Image (tube, rainbow, N blue to C red):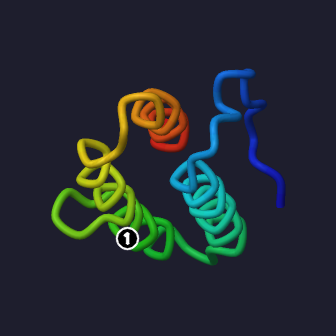
Amino acid sequence: MAARFALPPFYFLPCPMVFELQELEASALSAISVAASPRDVEELRVRYLGRASGEINAFVARLPTLPADQRRSSGKVLNDVKA
């Protein structure tokens, strides 16, 4: 499944985190599309967006460790995925 957003040219910096985020987004969208009940959707919301253990928060914690040029592109993609 392709990412739902097109990447502007400055995203094409060599940054593995951007690709990891795209894979995470594709995985989340796939899981949501096969969720059978509201409870399943809630479990996915907690899994991906939960404050304490959400998968996206692991990326937020990694942002400060990236070089400045990668931090900008990764941060923008991270915000797009969260939306």
Q: Quadrant of the N terminus?
A: bottom right
The extreme right residue here reads: 1
Q: Residue at x 51, y 53 (%)?
A: 17
52 or 42: nearer the viewer: 52
> Residue 29 falls in which quadrant of the image?
bottom right
Q: Residue at x 52, y 31 (%)?
A: 73
71 or 30: nearer the viewer: 71
**Amino acid carrying mark 1 in the image:** Arg
82 or 58: nearer the viewer: 58
Q: Viewed as shown, does residue 5 lie left or right of 45?
A: right
Which residue matches tag 1? 47
Q: Residue at x 83, y 53 (%)?
A: 2
The extreme top residue here reads: 9
Q: Viewed as shown, does residue 18 lie left or right of 53?
A: right
Where does the image place residue 83, in percent across and percent down from the top left?
Answer: 49, 36
> Residue 64 falls in which quadrant of the image?
top left
43 or 23: nearer the viewer: 23
Instruction: Give the total number of marks visible in the rendering.
Output: 1
Where does the image place residue 47, in percent across and percent down from the top left?
Answer: 37, 70
Where does the image place residue 59, in percent across and percent down from the top left?
Answer: 36, 55
Q: Viewed as shown, does residue 65 lie left or right of 43?
A: left
* Label 1: few (<14), some (14–19) or many (≥20) C-alpha neighbours in 10 Å: some
Q: Residue at x 16, y 64 (%)?
A: 52
Where does the image place residue 49, in percent across and percent down from the top left?
Answer: 35, 56
Say what secondary structure mark 1 lies in.
helix
Residue 36 lies, with reference to residue 44, above or below; the image says below
Residue 1 lies, with reference to residue 80, above or below; the image says below
Q: Viewed as shown, does residue 70 lie left or right of 59?
A: right
